[in-house]
Amino acid sequence: MRISQILTAVFVATLLIATVPASAATGNYTLGVQSGTTSDTYAAENLPNANVMGYDSIDLAIAALEQGDVDFVLGDLPTLKFYQTDTNGLTVAGSFSEEDFGIGVAPGESDLLAAINVALGEIIDSGEYDTIFAASFGDEIVVLTDDTDSNTAEAYPAEPSGKLADILAAENLVFGTDPYYPPFESYDNEDDIANATIVGFDADIAAAIGAKIATGYNQNLNVTMVEKTWDDLLAFGYTDYDATLSAMTKTAQRAEKTDFSRAYYSSKQGILASADSPTITGVDDLNKAADAEEDDSPSVTLVVSALTVALIAVFSRRR
């Protein structure tokens, strides 16, 4: 068998392989998520046929979608809607999985948790919550889960102790947040972060909580939000901040390491697509082989068969 004949057969087969889309060759969709989020966990537990790419921030996951490195991005629906309106060509392709956000405090800090819960209750009952919500989410309808129970405080602790006592003494309440997750938290000037202010829905909720607690104790109380990475927040160290306020979903696993407040936001997760993303009808489609909708494309089996035929043809001419 001549070398030229072998090369010819391999060349023909290679051309055929090149016509097979990558998604069809792997049989999976590639999903971008922010590592450590509930979207990451959901994909791992419910979408075993998908290739999941974890990124340090939602911005990086969105950039991967725009560059064609992933087929879809999973994340909290309000944040995906923000990027849908902020970036040309990106659209929300569906939503799934109800979730509630909570404010975290260190385990055992019952007085601080009580004060935050009472403040949240006052914000919600007074209608101030609706105003804060509208500032970030416009005319969307507020459907906030009421997950309070008999253990949820209804009055500020009369004799504050622990972290709450320290906060009142210092007149400073510090929230840790990952400020790269609009519209919940972001810098008002990313070109000059050193002099920028953290803004967004969570920042407004933080300010309102501080104001209510200050009124409850008839004193001044400054509210500060400090930048933390998402990994830092998930470690629940509370080293230089008092509470976590960063669009964090309340889960049983996280509740083993921190104590959560009542829900302050209720939402769903969403699917963000680009103009080049495959067409899907819902989250279940992400668990199907991508080549199911590409029946007119040559399959890997067909390519292998073509290579076999080509080699047989070469061997038949070996005389």
Image (cartoon, rainbow, N blue to C red):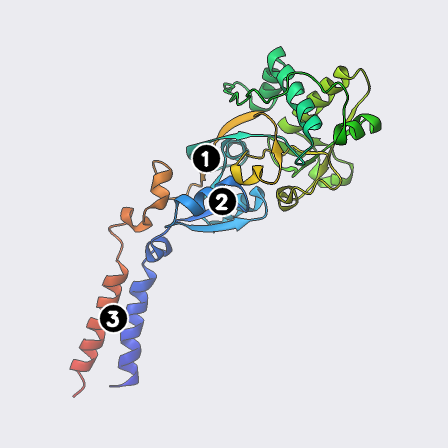
Residue 19 drawn above or below residue 306: above
Residue 164 position within the rendered picture, expressed as x and y whole percent measured from the top left:
75, 28
What's the CA distance linking mark 2 and mark 1?
Answer: 12 Å
Q: Are marks 2 and 1 in contact (CB under 8 Å)?
A: no
Depth check: give the residue in front, 101 or 271.
Answer: 101
| In-image side of 288 versus 271 (left or right) | left
Q: Residue drawn 29% across and 64% down?
A: 16
Residue 246 position within the rendered picture, expressed as x and y whole percent measured from the top left:
62, 34
Q: Which mark is residue 40?
A: 2
Q: Are marks 3 and 1 in contact (CB under 8 Å)?
A: no
| In-image side of 89 versus 118 (left or right) | left
Residue 129 drawn above or below residue 4: above
Quarter of the image with the N terminus is: bottom left
Mark 2 Cα shell of 10 Å, populated few (<14), some (14-19), many (≥20): many
Q: Residue drawn 79% across and 23% down?
A: 221
Depth check: give the residue in front, 272 or 121.
Answer: 121
Q: Residue drawn 56% across and 26% down?
A: 265
Q: Secondary structure at mark 1?
A: strand
Residue 54 drawn above or below residue 255: below
Depth check: give the residue in front, 307 or 176.
Answer: 176
Q: Earlier in the sequence, mark 2 or mark 1?
A: 2
**Quadrant of residue 200 within the rendered picture:** top right
What's the CA distance linking mark 3 and mark 1?
Answer: 42 Å
Q: Which residue is mark 3?
A: 307
What's the CA distance linking mark 3 and mark 2?
Answer: 40 Å
Depth check: give the residue in front, 27 or 257.
Answer: 257
**Quadrant of residue 161 within the rendered picture:** top right
How many circles with numbers are drawn on the protein? 3
